[in-house]
Amino acid sequence: MTLDKDIKAFCKNSGTFSIPLIQIEFSITYKEAARVVDELVGAGEALPLSDELSYEYVSEECVSPPVCRKCDPISSNEDEEDEDDEETMNRRRREYLERRRRELIARLHEDMDENNDEDDDDEDNNLFSDDEDDDDYEEDDSYDGEKLQSKLIEILTSENEFGKLLAKALKLCASEGNICDEMLSIHLNIRESVAHELCFWLYINDFIEKDENKGYKLAVPEALFYSCCIEARERKEHVGTLVDVLKRITAQKQREEEDNKIKALILSDISLNRAKAIVKAQGCLMAVQDADNDVCVSIYKNIICKLSNMSDYTFNKLKKQLSG
């Protein structure tokens, strides 16, 4: 966009700049100014200064590789200094991007809480947080194929709100060819600020890249992305099937437990009739309720229901079968 180019040219000519300065110069909102600054930092064209409020534009001379010179002590020292400066710049850039990523994730979850009027209890918030074993990624700026595939599947199978929005954004980018803040806001029915934070997270994590025409395009190979989508769907189906099986097993065990407790209840007293059996079952129910045993509470409620719906004749017949 023309405005973005003008802002970048202003930053380049100024040398040092800040988000409030850009707001005053171009009469734009904080979000619009911050978006351009984030792009400059993400592309390595700007670095935050020590006060973390101002930024320094990095000229091409600073980021270009050093010119080869004859090996002499003076030139060697200059080369080492250039390499140290470049390493320092890269380290500061990575630290800034990591700090911005964490801020954006925290702000996104705050927005979700405001929209839904409920607490997420930080469920699965560790999905996109760095573990101690992720230190190697700070040393190497690129994912290998296995890490990229694993991260994609992790996003596509996520059950928390942030992960679901990321998955929808990636699928929309793959189907439409590109995405932008406005498109995500419309298709996902979210605020444009949230859409910007989604795009920025995907961008700094190398899932999408800048498109020459508009917004962002998919940076992941399409074949890999669609294969990950298929695998993610199969995993969800497998988990769903497993949950159904576990539910059936649990229900079967509960029915067996009910039958055993009814048998024990009837055999506990030979003179017990159906009415007394119901009273005794109600006493057992009160006992397990005091113990906060939800499983036994459900079992005794079912037992009382069965005894209440059972006739005296059926109860006596059952009692005779169990006794004989």
Image (cartoon, rainbow, N blue to C red):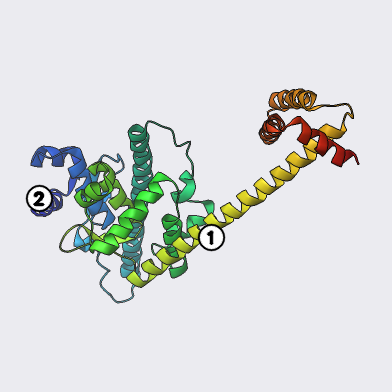
Q: In which quarter of the image is the C terminus?
A: top right
**Considering only vertical position in the picture, is 141 above or below 56?**
below
Q: Which label sits on residue 182?
A: none
What's the distance in space between the residues labelled 2 and 1, CA to CA?
Answer: 49 Å
Horizontal and vertical percent position of residue 239: 54, 56
Horizontal and vertical percent position of residue 30: 19, 38
Horizontal and vertical percent position of residue 191: 25, 41
Q: In this view, does 113 lie to the left or right of 177?
A: right
Depth check, mark 2 against mark 1: the one in front is 1
Residue 89 seen in render: no
- Helix, strand or loop for disc 2: helix
- Numbered circles on residues, count: 2
Residue type marked 1: His
The residue carrying mark 1 is: 238
Residue 66 seen in render: yes
* Residue situated in front as seen by the camera: 36 or 181: 181
Q: Which label sits on residue 3?
A: 2
Residue type marked 2: Leu
**Considering only vertical position in the picture, is 43 above or below 126?**
below
* Residue density around tag 2, few if under 14, some if 14–19, many if 20 or more, within 10 Å: few
Residue 26, picture quadrant: top left
Residue visible at 42% across and 55% down in the picture: 155
Q: In which quarter of the image is the N terminus?
A: bottom left
Residue 178, picture quadrant: bottom left
